[in-house]
Image (cartoon, rainbow, N blue to C red):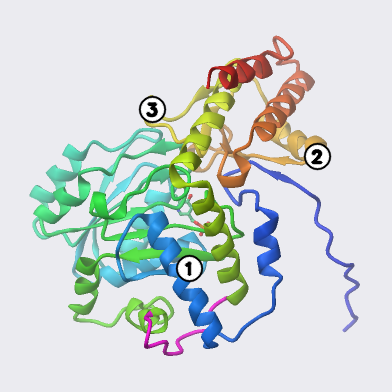
Amino acid sequence: MSTPVVSELAPPLRLLLGPGPSMVHPRVLRAMSTPLLGHLDPKFLEIMNEVQAQLRAVFRTENPFTIAVSGTGSAGMEAALVNLLEPGDTAVVVVAGVFGGRMADIVGRCGARLVKIDVPWGEVCDPARIEEALKREGKVKVVALVHAETSTGAHQPLEGLGALCHAHGALLVADTVTSLGGVPVEVDAWGVDACYSGTQKCLSCPPGLAPLTLSPRALEAVKARKTKVQSWYLDAGMVADYWAEGKRVYHHTAPISMVYALRESLRLVLEEGLEARFARHRRHSAALMAGVAALGFEPQAQEGHRLPSLNCIKVPAGVDEAAARKGLLADHSIEIGGGLGPLAGKVWRIGLMGESARQENVLAVLAAIEQALAKQGKLARAGASLAAALESYARS
Ligand SMILES: *Cc1c(COP(=O)(O)O)cnc(C)c1O
């Protein structure tokens, strides 16, 4: 067999404005290149404690079980569901996009009975529909939904849902992959029993870990299982014995450098302050949306429920959206996202997550979109989007 000739790694510098990964602060990249420790080294155990405390602050929870699952956001999703569900249980899942659909898929793989609440893509679920399902379906173990549906840009309110679920003896599972660190997430105040996220969206860390917090109520449900968790790797009981202070029993080797990166990205989040960070996301999203509106793009998500971190916009008729996105990448080194599933070819998803939510990025992507539209003869008035964005900035 011949030896492959592989040159030294030199990826191009991209402006990441897609649905994740987002831009990463140099401090995070620096943290990743610091020396490795063993995963049971007392110094590393200290670092784990720090990350747990930081995650509790960002999730706004006192839950002792607050960890970073080894794996991306989907591992967090799978961990939440496989630990809470066993064959014969019933789970109500709100499906309003790709990620609600992924939750429903996992529920089926757990052998649980799936009760789907289908919501048109771009809309949010009326809590009355969840209440109706809880009353109708008998004993429901879990109600699961996505707080920030990255495939549509819809922002599902969660306030009051914990109390509603608990009144019916159900647990609330929330996907906050595209909301944590970008818009308010209140695990304790909202009564969320299992809440997971991912590192590469609004936390602006490379992909690789999934923050997860479980309420004492959720942990009781895990303890009361009749069957073993079907996933050895994601078994919360065993993983907890590694993360629990005083125990620290080897389960699997923690991805050390990723934990360093998360620690630094959470330092950046907490230095900025959650409120200031949310305000920054709102401000740049408002400018971007004003800009694209001037070019004829309309929002996909329902009015009053639009995510600032993920701006999903309908591509005007007649525009070759794939060619335009290709131009953005080739001519401007800017990545934005296309549509998923039934929205493929119809929408763009522009992420302004964490470090990506900056004025220079908003103005750069608007200028690039104008050039791409001009190439297709679809630009009515040059500079219109920049003028609208600057006006939005002047107002805020
Ligand atoms: C990105 C995303 C996921 C999956 O995360 P991965 O890191 O890609 O595994 C899950 N849910 C939502 C809402 C997401 O945006």
Q: Residues within 10 Å of mark 2 (few under 14, many from 20)?
A: few
Residue at image position (66%, 23%) is 319
Does 281 sit left or right of 303 as displayed?
right
Residue carrying label 2: 330
| Of marks 1 and 3, the one in the foreground | 1
Element class at badge 2: helix
Which numbered tag is attached to residue 368?
Answer: none
Q: CA distance from mark 2 to mark 3?
A: 32 Å
Residue corresponding to mark 3 = 302
Identify the amino acid type marked 1: Val
Disc 2 from disc 1: Cα separation: 38 Å
List x then y, in percent, for residue 295.
62, 17
Q: Earlier in the sequence, mark 1 or mark 3?
A: 1
Reading the image, the residue beneath label 1 is 51
Task: Classify 30 as above or below 330.
Answer: below
Residue furthest front as drawn: 271
Depth check, mark 2 against mark 1: the one in front is: 1
Tell which circle, 2 or 3, labels the residue nearer the N-terminal end. Answer: 3
Element marked by disc 3: loop
User: Are circles 2 and 1 on residues that touch, CB within 8 Å?
Assistant: no
Specify start and end residues of the magenta stretch as a single range: 244-255
Q: In the rendered structure, are the residues bearing label 2 and label 3 in contact, judged by CB atoms less than 8 Å apart?
A: no
Q: Position of residue 221 (x, y in %)?
A: 20, 71
Q: Nearer the viewer, residue 12 or 276?
A: 276
Label 2 CB less than 8 angstroms from ligand 1: no
Q: Is residue 145 left or right of residue 34?
A: left
Q: Secondary structure at mark 1?
A: helix
Quadrant assignment for the N terminus:
bottom right
